[in-house]
Structure formats: structure tokens, C-alpha cells
Amino acid sequence: MAKIVSLPQAVSELVRDNDTVALEGFTHLIPFAAGHEIIRQGRRGLTLVRMTPDLVYDQLIGAGCASKLVFSWGGNPGVGSLHRMRDALATGWPVPLEIEEHSHAGMANRYVAGASGLPFAVLRGYAGTDLPEHTASISSVTCPFTGEELAAVSAVNPDVTIVHAQRADRSGNVQLWGITGVQKEAVLAARRAIVTVEELVDELTPVPGAVVLPTWVLDAVAVAPGGAAPSYAHGYYHRDNTAYREWDAISRDREAFTRWLKSVKEAGA
């Protein structure tokens, strides 16, 4: 059952050094506030899992929180590269970074397998790529019914998944809508789950296409208005495209990034 707690308390109690951590959210509802709290609390040795690591993972990598990245695409959407990620891969600054690369379909199926309690997922994918040669979690199986060879990917079960949502009720049931990506699957695959929300309400009223995460699949809910910024929260605020463009210059330069990092840490003081 989910407890309603502060974000610092949720991270302190549920995110540990050397954990496998998934911060999911596609295009919107990206849990930036939670990522910044992980930075402030100085977590180290994390294996970061995300289908589309963008700014929040670039920030976590630059802050020295991560030792490994499991992903299917990485970049600053509409702008370019993730320069803190590139620096960690090329030079080991601030710490060396190992990577494990998949396709979008492969990552989504890994979450589904993890949520389903299965050891692996089967899909038609990776054909024509060399990813299976470099990624131990990709293999193949022969269909016992047709003889067709299919790709197999091992399940992913994060130690903790963190997502952002629009709202929760006072019992800890969470409601999110818009582009919901793999948030539900990532939560159900995890051993522990934190959700940050824009607001706490007395009742979750129906919204077309909404996903409800019941309190019994969550460990903590934290109210964090604006917790997805600079991404957007459908129905609450828009994407801050200026911030995404500005991040390119900040992330290119270690000194500029170090100043940004200091400001994040001071914001939580």
C-alpha cells in the first residue's frame, strides 16, 4: 500500500546505492523532480533503465549517480546529443559508464515480461542489427509450433521504478493520462515503486484513456507540482522547449554543468 510522503523521504527510503532504477515517462510526465532528488541525495552505482534517456538521465550521469545505462535511444529531443553521457562514455568523467542498448520494442517487451512474472519476452525484432552480438540480454528462440526463429529478450525487473502522474487520491491510488508509454508496465515490473504527482485529490474522476495505478502496487506517492518540468504534464502545463535548447550548451561544458549541478543541490537545501 502506498504511503503519502515527501519526495525526499520517498527517495531516502526506497532508492539505494547500486540499485537498478527506471525513471519512465514518454514525451511528457518525465519524473525530473525525482531525478534531481536522487542527485541531491548522492546515490551512486545506479543502473539506469529507460526507453528514451534524455535530459534527466544526462543529468544523473553527469552527477556521477550512474555506472550503467540500459536504453533504446538516447538524445536531447529535437536538439542533439546528450553530452554528459558522451563524456562519461568517452573519458569516464565523472565516472565510467557501461551501456546496454536495445530497440524500443525490445525494451517495452522486457518491461512486459517483468510485469508478467516471465523470464523473457519473444518478439520479431533486432533482425538486420548487430545488437544481439553486443548485448547479452538479447538471444533467440525457435517457435515450437512454426519453427520460426524469434528474438528473445530477458525480463527487466527494476529495484525501483519512478514515474510522474497527474494526480492521486488520499488512499494512494494514482491516475495518469495522455501518452502513457510503458509507465504501467515499468511500475508492475518493479520491486518498489514511487510516483510523484501534480496534486492530491479526494476522488479520481474518470478521464478518457486514463491509467489507474492502484495503491497496492505502489510504495510511495509524493506530491511534486511541476515535477515533470521541463517536459510537460498533459492538462497541467506545456513543454519548456527553451530549457531543452539551453541544456545543449550547459551539458557541452563541464564547468557550465558543474554550475548547474550546484544550483540543483542548493535548491534542495
Image: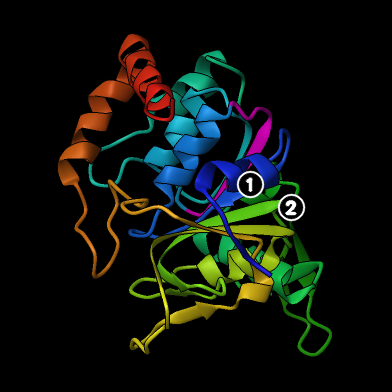
Along the line of sight, which residue is nearer the eye, 191 or 133? 191
Q: Is residue 73 above or below residue 94?
A: below
Crowd around label 1: few <14 · some 14–19 · many ≥20 (10 Å)? many
Does residue 103 appear anywhere in the picture? no
Residue under the point 54% across and 41% down: 8
Q: CA distance from mark 1 to mark 2?
A: 17 Å
Q: Amino acid at mark 1?
A: Val
Residue drawn at x 30%, y 48% as measured from the top left? 229
Residue at left 78%, top 81%? 143
Where disc 1 sits, the SS reads: strand
Q: Find disc 1 in the rendering and name its residue.
A: 21
Question: What amino acid type is highlighted by mark number 2?
Answer: Ser
Closer to us: mark 1 or mark 2? 1
- Magenta stretch, residue numbers: 42-51
Q: Position of residue 250 (x, y in %)?
A: 28, 22
Query: Residue 170's mark?
Result: none
Q: Which residue is mark 2?
A: 137
Query: For the point 27% across and 46% down, which residue is it?
Result: 230
Q: Nearer the viewer, residue 64 or 220?
A: 220
